[in-house]
């Protein structure tokens, strides 16, 4: 079971990035997936989760709601995170992971972590 995140990079405030998480060794119907992030000197926090193993419902934090969109493609076995109107506070390493409780989208609900991808938002 593996998760591979990609799509990070550097962008100016107000810009957009699209992250992609490719799952291998399992099907999305078996696990729900979340995006989490960790800024320098801070703990990991949930960003957005999707209940791919259930009804496909999505969860966002108050900070990401309206700016980020999570989606899944079960034919490709991928989960994407479209991030718009990025702010400097969004700067962090972003991780995708399996989650047992997508409605809470908390780091302690994670089963398997993928490797991270750096997102930097600065002018």
Image (spheres, rainbow, N blue to C red):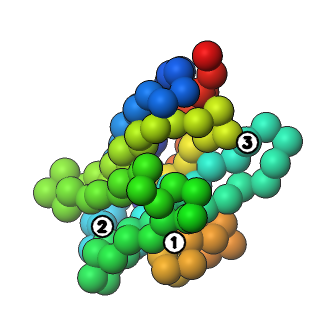
Foreground pick, 68 / 73: 68
Rendered image quadrant of residue 19: top left
SS label for mark 2:
helix
Disc on res. 39: 3
Query: What is the number of the mark on residue 99?
Result: 1
Q: Residue 28: which disc?
A: 2
Q: Which quadrant does the C terminus fall into?
A: top right
Is 7 placed left or right of 78 in the picture? Answer: right
Does residue 21 show up? no
Residue 2 image offset from top left, x and y in percent: 44, 53
* Residue 12 vertical position relative to residue 82 in the rendered view, above or below: above
Visible in this render: residue 11? Answer: yes
Query: What residue is drawn where x is 43% and y is 50%?
Result: 67
Horizontal and vertical percent for residue 70?
A: 36, 57
Residue found at the far left of this picture: 75
| The N terminus lies in quadrant | bottom left
Residue ranking furthest to the top: 123
């Amino acid at each position: 079971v593996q998760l591979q995140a990609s799509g990070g990079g550097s962008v100016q405030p107000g810009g957009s990035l699209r992250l992609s998480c490719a799952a291998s060794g399992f099907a999305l119907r078996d696990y729900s997936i979340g995006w989490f992030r960790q800024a320098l000197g801070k703990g990991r926090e949930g960003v957005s989760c999707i209940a791919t193993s259930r009804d496909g419902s999505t969860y966002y934090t108050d900070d990401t709601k309206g700016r980020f969109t999570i989606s899944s493609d079960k034919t490709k076995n991928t989960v994407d995170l479209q991030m718009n109107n990025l702010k400097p506070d969004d700067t962090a390493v972003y991780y995708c992971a399996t989650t047992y409780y997508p409605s809470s989208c908390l780091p302690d609900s994670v089963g398997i972590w993928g490797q991270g991808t750096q997102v930097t938002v600065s002018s």
